[in-house]
Every structure is written in structure tokens, then in C-alpha cells.
Amino acid sequence: MLTRLQNKILEMIATGVPLDETVDLLCRTVEEMDPDVICSVLGLDQQNRLRHLAGPSLPSVYSAAIDGIAIGPGVGSCGTAAFTGEPVTVTDIATHPYWAPYKQLALPLGLAACWSSPILASGKVLGTFAFYFRTPRGPTETEQKIVAACVHLCAIALERDQRVAERRRLAETDALTQLPNRSRFNDMVAMQGESDCPWGIILGDVDNLKLVNDTFGHRAGDDLIRTVASRIAIAAEPGVSFRLGGDEFAIVVVGEDSQDLAGIAARVLEAIKAPCTCAEQVIYPSLTLGGAVAGKNDNPEQVRQNADYALYHAKERARGSFIQFVPGLGTAIVKRFRAIQDVTEALREGRIEAYYQPIVDFATGQVASLEALCRMRTRSGDMLAAAHFHEATKDANIAFELTRRMLNIVAADMRRWVDDGLDFGRVSINLAAADFYRAGLTDRVAACFAEAGVPLKSVTLEVTESVYLDQRDQIVADQIQQLRAAGMSVALDDFGTGFASLTHLLTVPVDIIKIDKCFVQRMISDKAGSVIIKGLIDIARGLGIRVVAEGVETGEQAETLHWLGCTYGQGFLYSRAIDRASMTTLLKERRTLGTPLGSAANAPLSIAG
Ligand code: C2E
Ligand code: CA
Ligand code: CA
């Protein structure tokens, strides 16, 4: 009988039946074999407290009362046995001093005696196995044999259970930081879908981890990760912190606290920023955070996606700080992703083309120069204007590739026009911020036109006011100077949309200013606008800078601009951007565009009013 029981229990252990189920069956079988006894198995937790595992015939109030009691000398039979590692035989609960505090609990339930044996494995106490008797007595010889076998079985079962738990803990813990890892994060997020409790997620990226690794070595990088992890974990409480891998962290906040993600994020950012020593280097940690609160109908996946959008946004716009998801953020980012993808494919498949828009001399209506504008041909053959995929050009790699492609196309087109003996004046090409932040801009451009045999004096590069103003590290200023020194002219594009001032123009001179179309369009209705344009034109003239007005759509605008002293205009009044073949025809015909306005001296003397 005992052998059968042993085999059965060992089989349950081997096949991974849960611990409580296994010891429960053990107790029931023993009680069947010896109806005089009541079995109890208790475990021991990390804090050395007794934990109920099985006791099928013990009243549940009793089991519940025992559960959580700290072990110690004189704490009943089991508490003492667990504490001393020796069996404790109490033949009469009513009189034994170990039971003095507990007998009021046991006696009314008919428990008269208790014999408890420690469950030991590798010299450690894992729990206790106890027999309660209904009469005051000790164990019989047979009972001693049964208990010896049971204690042995329990030791195997408990040890195995601990090993499994430890393995699971290791599998769910990040080795470097000891924080729970991505797998636990996934579980916790999934769990939130099943409750009505409010909750939210904050996702974080450590800034410049790669730089720290590359500059100071991986030991410094690891130290940084560890420091950041422990600071996050403390500051984010009661939120639970996770390390998802690499430089990524996450915080899950459940309950009312989730309604103040910004508050938690602020605490984390504050805690993170103190300098720390990583592999003997002093580093100032910095973290970028994005968060999302679960809305009423959001599933966990959606909340996580939203937090991801917010983090992405923060990394683009607000490194070192926190951005919370708001509806619409996702759409903007998805749109941008799609644009980046579209342009990447178009670049790969050769579907990027250059269109040309003439810049016209107001006085003669003749083409003075051209602006190259990029166009994307869709797979179905439609031609998209740059405004449609402008979002993508904010991506540094795309912008860089796009410029390279445009330079090549434009150089080849210019070569052909030169060969055909056509006069196009100059051609201007738009640059993006990314072009300035890669070394050798002037060399790149110069090499491209040299290869096509096109002189640099017929090349203009357009720099938007926002890039021009971003004069950190002198990089843009230096490059503009270099481009001009190499013989190219530089145009300040979209003038009037930012805050470029005359002081800027004095320190970083340009050859051409292009007045933004919004200025031109406001000019007619808004007299102050025309006064500003007039002042600007006069000063530009004084500095030897040419002025081009953009977005000229009506004859009235052209007349006013011309009267104000502006010499060149660009806009739908004259022509939209057209492909190379159409531009070739236009140049061949030397057609007059719009209505020639004569020289400025013949212009009307007053503007309306
Ligand atoms: P931009 O440099 O200011 O170019 C002028 C834009 O205004 C062009 O739009 C042009 O088609 C449009 N436009 C011209 N005349 C008129 C007019 O009379 N009325 C109105 N409402 N619009 C007019 P597009 O081609 O869609 O280009 C938009 C922007 O995309 C450009 O603004 C430029 O910033 C950028 N872009 C265009 N091509 C390139 C390129 O090759 N490289 C880079 N980095 N950016 C480019
Ligand atoms: Ca432009
Ligand atoms: Ca412009």
C-alpha cells in the first residue's frame, strides 16, 4: 500500500502535476490508510512564515489561521519543528506550552495532539508534515514509518517546485538589472484586458546608450543601464518597472495612479538625471518617455501601440522628456511612416523625377532661372507633388538620398540643355537640414556637376529659413559660406515664415531671398504686408541680394510686387512645375510668360488706396 502511494506521488512529481494537488492526494491517501490521523503539509516562504499547502480534513478556518504565522521556538508543533529542523511531538495540546497561544483554536475543533516533522532538503527546511490526533497521544511505529516515507516524498515535491519557480523567475527576470523582463511585461499588459481597473503604460528609451557603449565601452553601458533601471524602479512606484531589452524600459501603472502618468514620468525624469559613475566615467543619464492611458474601449494591444507612438514622437521632438499619447498622434505618425516607406520604394524603383518651375523676370516675362522640384511617380503612373510626401523628407536618410537623386537628375538635364544651346539661366535645387549635417556637402554637389560638365555658377542651392536659422555649431553657416566660395549661389527659401532677421543676413550672407508665398498672398489685402515687403526689397538691394517672390498667382500680385521693386517672380501665373520635355520646349520657344510689366520706373506710382 505504502509502495503504491510512493510510486503514485513520484509519478505526479515527475509529470509536473502542481504541488498543492500532489500533496493533497498524499494527505488523502494517508488518511484513508490510517483513519485516526489528520494530515497537514505546510510550506515555508521567503520570510520564514508557514504557508498552507494541504490539509484536506482540517477545518478551513483552522488552515487559514495557521497560514502566514512566523516560525519560531514554541510556535506550536509545526512552527517549532520548522524553526529547529527537528520533529516535535506534542501529545496533549491542552497542556503543552508550545500550544498555549493556539490551543483555543485547536481544541474546539477536536484536535488533541500534534506531531510535526520538518521537511528537509539539502540541509534546508522547506516545510513541515504533521499528524494531528483526535486523542492525546504520540505516533505508533507504523505511523512513524508512514511519516518517514511521506516526509521524503514531500521533500522531493517541494524541492522540485522551488526549482521550477526559480527557473521561471530567471526566465522572467532581466539578468543585468534584475527587473522583470519583456515576457512579464507582456503578461501584465495582457492581464489588464481582463479587469475594469484603470491603467496605463509608460515606455522609455535611454538616450545615447549607443554613444556610451561606443565611446566608453560596454562595461560603462551596462553600468548605465543598471543605474537607470534602479532609479526608474524606485521613482515609478507604485508603477511596476520592466526592462524590455537594450535601452528600452516600461512602466505599467494600475489603478488611480494611472490617471497621472505625467506626474510619474516627471518623478522618473527627475530621479534619472543625477550624474553617475559608469566604468570610471561620469555620465549624465537621460531618458525619453512616451505614455498612454487605457481608454474605455482600448484593448491592451492598442494602449501599448499608443504608448509606442507617444515615445516615437517624444524621440523625434522632445528627447529627454515625456509625451503623452493624444488621439491623432498615431495618425500623424502612421502617415509619416507611410510617406517614408513610399519615398524609399520610389527611390529604389527610380520613380523620383525632377520637374522645373520657371522664375520669371517681371519686366520682360522671360524665364530668368528655374527651380527644380521633386516629384514622385506612383506605381499607377500618377505624379505627386513634393507637398504630398513632404513628411518623409524630415527623415534624415530620405532627405539625403532625395537630394543625391535630384542633384544627379538635374545635372544631367542641365547638361542636355547646354548641349542644345538653350539658355536657362540657373537652376536651383532645394536642400534639407540633413544635407548640412553630413560632411562634405560642397564637395558632393561640386563633384556631381563636375561629372556632368556643368559650371557651378549656374547652380543655386535653396536653404529654407528654418534650416538657415538653425545655426548651432556654425555648421550651416560654414557650409553656406563654402558653397558660395565654390561659385554656387545660395537662396534663402520661404523667407518670412520664420524669424530670420537682417542681422542674420549680415553674418551669414546669401545671394537670393525668396519671399514666401503666404506673404505674397496676404500682400494685396494687408497694406502692412506690402510695406514690409517694400522695406525688405530696399534693404536686400542695398546688400546686393536678389529677391524672388514665390506663389505669384495673379496679375495684380505681379504688378504690385514689381511696383514695390521686386524683379523676379515664381508662381502659377507663369507656369506650374513641368517635366523636362515640356521645359525644353518652353526654353526653345523663348516664350514670354504672363504680361510683361516693363521696367519698374514705368510702374504705377501708388498701390490701391
Ligand atoms: P518650395 O521650395 O517653397 O517650393 C515651392 C512650392 O510651391 C512647390 O510645391 C510649388 O509647386 C509650389 N508653388 C509654385 N507656385 C505656386 C503658386 O503660385 N501657388 C501655390 N499655392 N503654390 C505654388 P511642391 O513642389 O509641392 O514642393 C513643396 C515643398 O517641398 C517645396 O517648397 C520644398 O520645400 C520641398 N521640396 C520640393 N522639392 C524638393 C527637393 O528636391 N528636395 C527637398 N529637400 N525639398 C523639396
Ligand atoms: Ca524652394
Ligand atoms: Ca519656398
Image: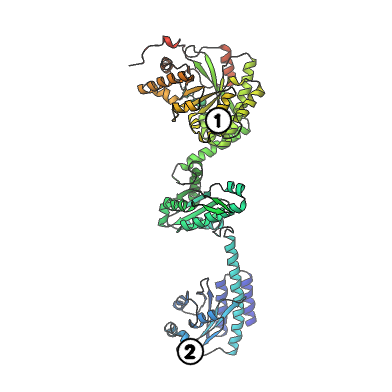
Residue 574 screen position, x and y as percent: 49, 17
- From this view, report whether residue 79 is shown above or below residue 217: below
**Quadrant housing the N terminus:** bottom right
- From this view, report whether residue 554 is shown above or below residue 209: above
Quadrant position of residue 475: top right
Q: Residue furthest right?
A: 451
Quadrant position of residue 498: top left
SS assignment at label 1: helix
| Residue to which mark 1 is pinned | 478
At label 2, which amino acid type do we have? Asp
Quadrant position of residue 542: top left
At label 1, which amino acid type do we have? Asp
* Residue 430 shows in this picture: no
Residue 96 screen position, x and y as percent: 47, 88
Around disc 2, counting alpha carbons within 10 Å, would you say few (fewer than 14), some (14 to 19), or many (20 or more)? many
Q: How far apart, in angstroms, are the residues tagged by discs 1 and 2?
A: 96 Å
| Residue to which mark 2 is pinned | 92
Front: mark 1 or 2: 1
The structure residue drawn at horizontal position 56% and vertical position 32%, both measured from the top left corner, is 436
Residue 450 screen position, x and y as percent: 65, 23
